[in-house]
């Protein structure tokens, strides 16, 4: 597969970035993805600076290849996580759920590449002006905290609105998705859900099995009324949310209900009352494979799709 500007920017073989998923993307997964030629990302989520430093050190013990850290901008630990990134000279960061503009000058000073995840054209343009190196345009098909636009609609509009490289995310799990993203003008892809079923992913086995069993319509979006909609697999918790939304329950009550639920799913394996965050593409995932096998399969798949596209 031909290298894209993203490969040169990040020093990687394939233009595949692994989503920095909270409680999912630990050093084990990130290092395995980087070893296989993509860019692994440690998801800091709501964890503190100490946890992030430990994960960076662990990843460096497994791989000499570049990897990144995702900073969740709504976390109370953003400041100390950014400090660890600066001290450890992490080569790449992605950000989610907010605007990282105020940290860009410091990060650029040490050469860290900054790649925010954005759900709209306006935010992509604002962050381009602030000096980011690329953006991840993430469609609403994604898992976790999501925007409104689909990948199909968002990616080409962002591509036309900015000069920096655009990475497509949301609904991509195989070679077909990669080729589609490149056809929309993206220079690479960010893949999350597929890597949840990687052998090196340390989430609870219950969650991997739930994804393998998932069908096309098995995700739901909860919490639109709170302003922080989250996509996850349907279960008792999403039913409860639905009921609360129908009954116009107070927003604070809904926010309280969500607290800690991502961890109880991913770490404790609570498939019923935890938040099993994952994307709409879960229905496509049928097997647990190593990160290397997943990446090789995606690349081989993309090549065979391209071979059928000769016009
Ligand atoms: O961030 C994600 N996915 C996430 S974060 C997360 S943890 C969480 N838990 C409860 C509530 C909220 C988060 C679980 N999954 N993906 C990247 C992403 N970023 N999607 C959408 C956005 C986004 C939304 C608004 C980025 C920027 C933004 O800007 C608002 C502003 O400040 O202008």
Image (spheres, helix red, strand yellow):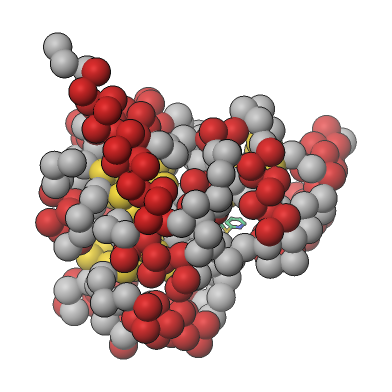
In-front residue for pair 208/105: 208
Residue 253 drawn above or below residue 233:
below
Residue 167 horizontal side relative to residue 53, left or right: left
* Figure quadrant of residue 161: top left
Asked whether residue 230 is in view, the answer is no
Residue at image x 17%, y 62%?
A: 11
Residue at image x 62%, y 28%?
A: 216
Residue 26 drawn above or below residue 194:
below
Residue at image x 21%, y 23%?
A: 307
Residue 188 drawn above or below residue 105:
above
In-front residue for pair 268/237: 268
Q: Residue 303's x, y, as percent?
A: 24, 32
Q: Residue 162's x, y, as percent?
A: 19, 40
Q: Residue 67's x, y, as percent?
A: 31, 68
- Quadrant placement of the N terminus: top left
Residue 108 horizontal side relative to residue 172, left or right: left
Residue 219 drawn above or below residue 308:
below
């Amino acid at each position: 597969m031909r290298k894209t500007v993203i490969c040169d920017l990040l020093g990687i073989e394939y233009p595949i970035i692994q989503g920095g998923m909270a409680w999912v993307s630990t050093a084990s997964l990130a290092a395995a993805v980087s070893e296989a030629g993509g860019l692994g990302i440690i998801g800091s989520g709501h964890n503190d600076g100490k946890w992030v430093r430990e994960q960076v050190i662990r990843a460096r013990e497994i791989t000499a290849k570049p990897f990144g850290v995702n900073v969740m901008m709504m976390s109370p630990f953003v400041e100390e996580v950014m400090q660890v990134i600066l001290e450890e000279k992490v080569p790449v960061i992605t950000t989610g759920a907010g605007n990282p503009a105020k940290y860009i000058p410091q990060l650029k000073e040490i050469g860290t590449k900054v790649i925010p995840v954005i759900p709209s054209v306006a935010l992509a343009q604002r962050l381009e002006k602030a000096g980011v190196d690329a953006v991840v345009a993430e469609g609403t098909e994604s898992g976790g905290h999501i925007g409104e636009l689909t990948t199909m609609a968002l990616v080409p509009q962002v591509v036309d609105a900015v000069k920096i490289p655009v990475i497509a995310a949301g609904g991509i799990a195989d070679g077909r998705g990669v080729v589609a993203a490149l056809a929309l003008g993206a220079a690479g892809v960010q893949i999350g859900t597929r890597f949840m079923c990687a052998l090196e992913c340390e989430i609870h086995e219950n969650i991997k099995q739930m994804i393998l069993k998932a069908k096309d319509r098995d995700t739901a979006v909860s919490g639109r009324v709170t302003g922080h909609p989250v996509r996850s697999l349907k279960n008792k918790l999403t039913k409860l949310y639905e009921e609360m939304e129908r009954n116009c329950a107070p927003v604070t009550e809904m926010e309280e209900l969500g607290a800690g639920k991502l961890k109880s799913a991913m770490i404790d394996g609570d498939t019923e009352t935890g938040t099993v965050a994952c994307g709409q593409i879960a229905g496509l995932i049928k097997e647990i494979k190593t990160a290397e096998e997943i990446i090789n399969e995606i690349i081989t798949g993309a090549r065979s799709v391209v071979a059928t596209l000769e016009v």
